[in-house]
Amino acid sequence: MPPAGLLHVGRDEVRGYGVTITTGSVSELVKTAAGFEARLECGQRVGARKVLVATGLRDELPDITGLRQRWGTDVLHCPYCHGWEVRDKALGVLWNGPDTARFANIVRQWTSDLVLFAPDDVLAEADRPLLAARSVRVVEGGVDRVVVESDHLTGVLMRDGRTVARDALFVPPRLVPNDTLLTGLGCLTDDLGWVVVGVNGTTSIPGVWAVGNVSNPRAQVITAAGEGSAAAISINADLVDDDVREAVHEVTQVAPP
């Protein structure tokens, strides 16, 4: 199912339970006396006692002409998500950091025809025999662009003029969380820059939860959905605890001496 289709089904389902969906981007979350206020770019402000943030992440790709336009079609990021669909084809892996050589050996499971494209002088000597043992061909040099014909990727054009025919490419992207709302509130982050969350998605700011890729780069859809379910239960329990405390306070205030 296309991602937009999944969102459509989910939104229709929650509307059936009386949920209001507001279309727009939240530019800021602000702590208030009553809880929090979400400020939308359109100027609308929405108050809340608790907040769940699920703003995901973005993929930062190498700056190669045509790469982003083919992203999710025949330029792919996950051998576990997409390997089956391109099995036994002529595949390539584009360099995007020192872990790319290991990434290439994971992609190698799906094809016997794999090329690793690496800039000059970046591939560690220790990686070369590992790639050679698995018959992964290494093409070194700068990549100029991806070659597309009839809306299909057909190869990679090198800066020296060589064209290496390929059917699909894998790129290990740099994953960057869309966590501005969380860090703006002061949520703690770990050494790698990801917001720290507890078992049920609790952050260091009481009343704020984070789930999915905004805090967990490895969360696929089913994982993120599970995190959302656990957070929802935790939020509901927290709201009930608040209600109980408020009720006890009110009773105590009006009780006769």
Image (tube, grey):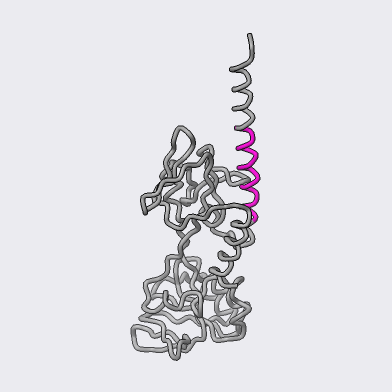
Q: Quadrant of the C terminus?
A: top right
- Tell me residue 208's x, y (percent): 52, 42
Nearest to the observer: residue 75 or residue 160: 75
User: Of all residues shown, which one is farthest toward the top?
Assistant: 257
Q: Is residue 61 above or below residue 158?
A: above
- Tell me residue 185's x, y (percent): 43, 42
User: Of all residues shown, which one is farthest toward the bottom?
Assistant: 150
- Name the residue located 37 percent from the left edge and 72 percent from the top edge: 63
In the image, the segment drawn in magenta is 226-242
Nearest to the observer: residue 194 or residue 91: 194
Q: Is residue 119 above or below residue 206?
A: below
- Name the residue located 52 percent from the left edge and 44 percent from the top edge: 51
Q: Is residue 199 above or below residue 169?
A: above
Nearest to the observer: residue 196 or residue 250: 250
Q: Quadrant of the N terminus?
A: bottom right
Say left or right for 118 vs 224.
left
What secondary structure do most residues of the magenta stretch adopt? helix
- Tell me residue 243's x, y (percent): 61, 32
- Tell me residue 118's x, y (percent): 43, 76
